[in-house]
Image (cartoon, helix red, strand yellow):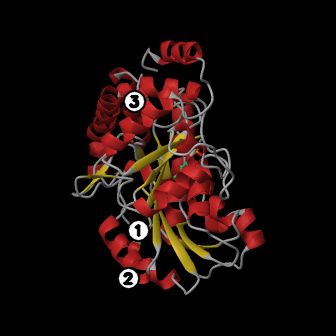
């Protein structure tokens, strides 16, 4: 929390426009468009909703195929499965949990419509290679940038490289409004329809701007827009983005520094950030040597009253996918490695330096 959240909610109530697309929504959208340098932003109720909008916008239909990394959150795949797509999962690369670009082409068929990439921990995928592959095969690219606010690749904000990008403002994210997110529309040809899908298939947004004299049902869609009360909360967070980011990156760098002796002794690994990528301080993770070691470390930290958690289980192995799709025969070795060995350390704005030191010392103590 930054302090202004409740004040702005009060202002939204006094404004008397609590439904979507009010003054706070418009402020947040304009702020994000200029901060990211992106064509168009629409606030949504979640990153999941923004992914669902993407699936509708790209006309994903039964029988289409969509390529998705296995090491990700359910929504990355679910939004497309709901439209009837079959998912082709791809393993992570060796150095990061992100999709391995070298394995993408083997999954492309004449049915492939889109490629969804996830910038895990806010660290960029290899976007240059990914965009080249997509261009060669005429595929849409969606960046699932749920974790990637204010992170960069070759100087460009993540979320501005693919045709569409989706972000999360869930309370676990750097910038939050409880539940929330947005869709960034980088392909200008998709912008007008995105606004219609956002507003229940109507051209109401155009009507509100005075561009047409009545609004009508013109397409498919849903109610994807959040209330202006959520946007009021979000404005307070966005106004403090530089302070929040500075503190989170500080915590991440402090962990990196304090745990470096274990990295040098090859007992653990930490985030790998390529030269053309940045760290946005979303997640600080370590990689243990195996599952047994990680389980023991989690218990050791718990005894010291420190909560550290692992992350995704590969989606290719989920009960839902096993039940609804023909199993893939490829190896998901890297994905399984991250599922078994990755451990996220506490990282939030209010975390004090001495608490970071205590977490690091407890980990050093475990390995000694
Ligand atoms: C990679 C990724 N995609 C999508 C989501 C879904 O975000 P939301 O909770 O805003 O729908 C998350 C949530 O953590 C995520 O990590």
Q: Position of residue 250 (x, y in %)?
A: 29, 32
Confirm whether residue 42 shows in the render: yes
Q: Secondary structure at mark 2?
A: helix
Q: Is residue 201 above or below residue 128?
A: above
Q: Position of residue 89 (x, y in %)?
A: 56, 72
- Give the distance between the C-alpha atoms of the residues marked 3 and 1, in whole angstroms: 32 Å
Can you name the residue that lies furthest to the right here?
323
- Tell how many labels: 3
Q: Is residue 353 above or below residue 174?
A: above
Say if disc 1 is inside 8 Å of ligand 1.
no
Image depth: mark 3 or mark 1 in front: 3
Task: Using the image, tell me which numbered label, if any, was put on residue 238.
Answer: 3
The residue indicated by pointer 2 is: 136
Q: Which residue is pictured at 33% across the width and 76% down the height?
A: 132
Q: Give neighbour class at mark 3: few <14, some 14-19, many 20+ (Cα, 10 Å).
A: some
Q: Secondary structure at mark 1?
A: loop
Q: Secondary structure at mark 3?
A: helix
| Quarter of the C terminus within the rendering | top left
Q: Sequence-wise, which precedes: disc 3 or disc 1?
A: 1
- Give the distance between the C-alpha atoms of the residues marked 3 and 2, in whole angstroms: 37 Å
Can you name the residue that lies furthest to the front here?
213
The residue indicated by pointer 1 is: 93
Q: Sequence-wise, which precedes: disc 2 or disc 1?
A: 1
Quadrant of the rendered image containing residue 27: top left
Q: Give neighbour class at mark 1: few <14, some 14-19, many 20+ (Cα, 10 Å).
A: some
């Amino acid at each position: 929390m930054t302090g202004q959240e409740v004040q702005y909610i009060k202002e939204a109530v006094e404004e008397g426009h609590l439904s979507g697309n009010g003054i706070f929504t418009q402020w947040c959208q304009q702020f994000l468009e200029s901060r990211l340098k992106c064509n168009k932003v629409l606030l949504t109720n979640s990153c999941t909703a923004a992914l669902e909008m993407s699936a509708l916008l790209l006309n994903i239909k039964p029988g289409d195929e969509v390529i998705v990394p296995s090491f990700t959150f359910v929504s990355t795949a679910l939004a497309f499965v709901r439209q009837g797509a079959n998912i082709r999962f791809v393993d992570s690369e060796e150095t990061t949990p992100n999709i391995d670009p070298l394995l993408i082409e083997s999954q492309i068929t004449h049915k492939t419509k889109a490629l969804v990439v996830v910038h895990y921990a806010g660290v960029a995928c290899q976007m240059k290679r990914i965009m080249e592959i997509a261009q060669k095969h005429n595929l849409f690219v969606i960046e699932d940038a749920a974790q990637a606010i204010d992170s960069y690749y070759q100087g460009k904000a993540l979320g501005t490289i693919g045709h569409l990008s989706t972000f999360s403002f869930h309370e676990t994210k750097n910038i939050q409004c409880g539940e929330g997110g947005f869709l960034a529309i980088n392909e200008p040809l998709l912008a007008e329809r995105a606004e219609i899908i956002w507003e229940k298939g109507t051209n109401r947004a155009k009507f509100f701007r005075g561009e047409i004299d009545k609004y009508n049902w013109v397409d498919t869609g849903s109610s994807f827009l959040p209330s202006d009360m959520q946007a009021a909360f979000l404005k307070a967070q966005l106004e403090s983005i530089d302070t929040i980011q500075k503190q989170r990156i500080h915590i991440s760098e402090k962990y990196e520094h304090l745990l470096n002796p274990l990295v040098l002794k090859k007992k653990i690994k930490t985030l790998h950030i390529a030269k053309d990528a940045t760290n946005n301080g979303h997640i600080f993770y370590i990689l243990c040597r195996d599952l047994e070691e990680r389980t023991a470390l989690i218990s050791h930290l718990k005894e010291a009253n420190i909560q550290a958690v692992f992350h995704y289980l590969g989606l290719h192995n989920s009960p839902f996918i096993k039940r609804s799709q023909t199993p893939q025969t490829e190896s998901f070795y890297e994905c399984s490695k991250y599922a078994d060995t990755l451990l996220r350390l506490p990282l939030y704005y209010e975390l004090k330096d001495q608490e970071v030191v205590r977490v690091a010392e407890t980990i050093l103590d475990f390995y000694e």
